Every structure is written in structure tokens, then in C-alpha cells.
């Protein structure tokens, strides 16, 4: 991947409060092979590092990548032939939606997210059609798309919602929550395949991770 120096009139860094953040004026970010190495005044980083490319200018503002914490698909149901019906009819029409390659569908949405400044996503699937081999195959295609485009992802093959009274809600949540040891498979930096309850990505948005879907658990 090489290295690059990204210049900006303002570099927005670490949040220091609910309404404040560290800001470097006339600053730069130096990255090597997808990892942020240095952040500081542009003049200092220019002297300190030899970058393969220089990006940005004093007309730009450099921000950490945004996080999309709730994402489902690329093409919308309407684009796939499901009219905007009342909810009950809409669910039925979704069952006859056009079939699309999950790899291409994920790339389509990833292009839109990157264009919006999103570099980390929580990808949630509502349902998958049996058999189990197909569920796993679709998941691998989706993770491959994120790996190829370089986005960081936390992936959930299914979501679970439950309603409970306040007196029983905590007990049910404790029973439903998978443990870190058994509930998710770590597939590399910034990528997790959780159990029924989605886990959020935890590493810094400044760092770009990859998700090799074939890695086993640690």
C-alpha cells in the first residue's frame, strides 16, 4: 500500500469531551501501509517522513473515519422490486425480491459509505435462507467485499430483538448475550462475526483494518 502524507488546514483528532476535540491547524497525517503513524503540524511531518504520495491541501479538513453503526444492504428493497407497501405486504413482497450477488451488493453500499466518509460499519443481516452452507457462503462473500475495499466491519449474520418487562429484561438479556469467548469469531483487526447479539467494532477509526474471512478464532 505504501505511505502518504495527508495535509489539511485543520486535522480533527481525538475527542476531548462531548463538544470538544483535539484540532491541529495547518496539520498533516502520515500513514504507512494503512496504519496511522504520526499526526501533527504539516511542517514537522514533512521534515520527519518521506511519503510516497502527498494528498490534501490547506483547503481541506481531515477527519477520522465515521462509523455506520446500523447497516443492512446495498441496493434498497425498492430498487430490488419491492414497492412501498404497508409493512405486512412489504414483508411478503421482499420474499420475491430480485436475487443479487452479495459481494457486488456490498461493494455498491461500500462505495457510497466511503464517499460519505464512513470507514467502519456494523453490517446486520435480518434473515438468511437455509441451508446453513448458504448462510455461511453469503457471509464469506460479504466479508470478502469489505476486505477487498479496505473497510473495517463488524458483521452479524442475524439480529435478535426481544421485549421484556423491566423486572425480567436484565435477566433475559444476560441469558441472550453471547460470551466474548464463544459468541464471536475474530477474523482480524476491526472485524468480528458475532453471535445473535451484534457487537460493535472497538478499535480506533483512525486505523484501517482488514478482515480475512478464513482466519480462525483466537
Image (cartoon, rainbow, N blue to C red):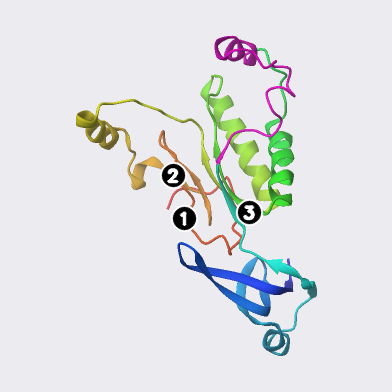
Residue placed at 67% from the left, 76% from the top? 30
Please give the residue where the numbered disc 1 appears in the rendered image. Answer: 202
- The image shows residue 134, relative to residue 70, as above or below, that is above
Cβ atoms under marks 3 and 2 closer than 8 Å = no
State the quadrant of the N terminus. Answer: bottom right
Dot 1 surroundings within 10 Å: few (below 14), some, or many (20 or more)? few
- The image shows residue 154, relative to residue 96, as above or below, that is below
- The image shows residue 200, relative to residue 45, as above or below, that is above
Residue placed at 24% from the left, 36% from the top? 170
First reached walking from the N terminus: tag 3 or tag 2: 3
Specify whether 19 is left or right of 35: left
Magenta span: 70-95
Q: Is residue 86 magenta?
A: yes
Please, what secondary structure does the residue beneath circle 2 have? loop
Please give the residue where the numbered disc 2 appears in the rendered image. Answer: 199
User: Splitting the image into 4 quarters, where does residue 135 fall?
Assistant: top right
Dot 2 surroundings within 10 Å: few (below 14), some, or many (20 or more)? many
Amino acid at each position: 500500500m505504501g505511505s502518504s502524507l495527508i495535509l489539511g488546514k485543520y486535522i480533527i483528532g481525538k475527542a476531548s469531551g462531548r463538544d470538544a476535540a483535539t484540532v491541529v491547524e495547518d496539520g498533516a497525517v502520515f500513514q504507512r501501509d494503512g496504519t496511522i503513524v504520526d499526526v501533527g503540524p504539516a511542517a514537522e511531518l514533512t521534515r520527519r517522513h518521506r511519503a510516497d504520495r502527498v494528498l490534501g491541501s490547506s483547503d481541506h479538513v481531515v477527519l477520522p473515519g465515521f462509523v455506520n453503526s446500523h447497516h443492512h444492504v446495498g441496493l434498497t428493497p425498492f430498487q430490488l422490486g419491492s414497492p412501498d407497501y404497508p409493512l405486512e405486504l412489504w414483508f411478503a413482497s421482499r420474499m420475491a425480491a430480485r436475487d443479487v450477488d452479495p459481494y457486488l451488493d456490498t461493494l455498491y453500499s461500500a462505495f457510497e459509505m466511503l464517499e460519505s466518509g464512513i470507514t467502519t460499519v456494523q453490517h446486520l443481516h435480518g434473515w438468511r435462507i437455509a441451508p446453513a452452507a448458504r448462510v455461511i457462503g453469503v457471509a464469506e462473500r460479504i466479508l470478502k467485499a469489505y476486505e477487498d475495499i479496505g473497510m473495517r466491519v463488524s458483521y452479524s449474520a442475524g439480529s435478535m430483538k426481544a421485549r421484556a418487562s423491566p423486572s425480567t429484561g436484565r435477566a433475559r438479556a444476560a441469558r441472550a448475550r453471547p460470551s466474548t469467548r464463544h459468541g464471536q469469531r475474530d477474523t482480524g483487526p476491526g472485524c468480528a462475526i458475532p453471535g445473535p447479539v451484534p457487537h460493535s467494532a472497538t478499535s480506533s477509526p483512525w486505523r484501517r483494518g482488514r478482515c480475512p474471512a478464513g482466519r480462525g478464532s483466537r
